Image (tube, helix red, strand yellow):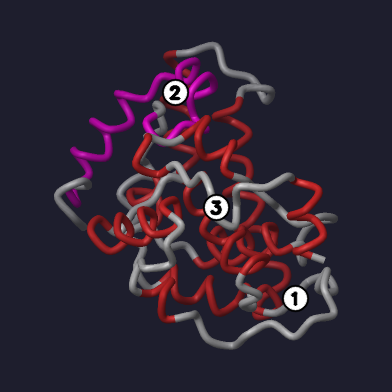
Amino acid sequence: MSNLFEPTVEAAQQQLSRVQPARYAQTRNALQGAVTRLSPYFTHGFIELPQALAALSSRFPLSGQDKLVMEFGWREFFAHVWQHQGEAIFKDLRPAISKQRYASRLPADVRSASTGVPVIDQAVRELYATGYLHNHARMWLASYVVHLRKVHWRVGADWLYGHLLDGDLASNHLSWQWVAGTFSVKPYLFNADNVARYAPSEWHSPGTVIDTSYEALEVLAR
C-alpha cells in the first residue's frame, strides 16, 4: 500500500498491538497524536473492525464511552448508512446550508498545493506523498474546500478518495457531507488557532483567510 503500511495480515496485527486506547483518547486530535493507523487495513480487508475491537477489549477495559470505541462506531455507522441509502450517499442528504452555487471543479491551486494557506498546502502534499492523512487534516481540507472555496463537497470527496490508501466510500463521502452540513445540522469550521493547537509549526497559518473568528467563518459558510 505504501512504505507506511505494509500490506500483510502480520503488519495489521502488529499495528493493532501498538494501539493504546487511553493515549488515543488524549492525543487523537493532534497530527502527531497516537492514532491507530488501522484504516488501510480495515479498508483492504487485512483485519475486520469487530475482530480489532475484540482484540483490544481483551487487553483493555473498554466501554461504549471510550473515544476509540466511538470512532469505530462512526465507521460502522457510515457503513450502515451506505447499506440503507445506497447511491443516495453521493448526493446531498440534507439541503445545502448556502444558497450560493457551489463549483463543480476543484481549484487548480488546491490540486497543486499552492493556495498560500500552509495547512492546506501541507495536507495536499502529504496526501500525494503518502496516500494518507490524519482525520483532523482531512476535516480541515474539506472545510476549506467547501466553505471557503465554495466547491461542492462531492467534487472534493471524489478527489480525496482517489488519492487515499484507506479510501472507504461510506466513511469518506459521508464525512465530507458532515463537514459540508448536508449530513449534519451545521457546517464544520476551523480557524488558524485550531491548527496552531493541533498541528506542527509548518502547518500554522497566521495571516491567512482562516486566521479569523468562528463567527466570521460561519457567515462565510452560510
Which residues are the magenta region? Answer: 6-32
Position above or below: 177 against 35? below
Q: Distance between the residues labelled 3 and 1?
A: 20 Å
Residue topped by disc 2:
56
Q: Residues within 10 Å of mark 3 (few under 14, many from 20)?
A: many
Give the residue type that dot 2 points to. Answer: Leu
Based on the picture, tell me whether residue 28 belongs to the magenta stretch.
yes
Q: Distance between the residues labelled 2 and 3?
A: 29 Å
Q: In this view, does 131 lie to the left or right of 76?
A: left
Q: Which element carries disc 2, helix, strand or loop?
A: helix
Give how far across and how far down residue 159 sits, in percent: 44, 75
Give the residue type that dot 1 points to. Answer: Asp
Give how far across and how far down residue 161 sits, in percent: 44, 69
Q: In this view, does 51 lie to the left or right of 104?
A: left
Q: Which element carries disc 3, helix, strand or loop?
A: helix
Residue topped by disc 1:
92
Give how far across and how far down residue 90 sits, in percent: 64, 78
Residue occupying the point 33% across, 59% down: 127
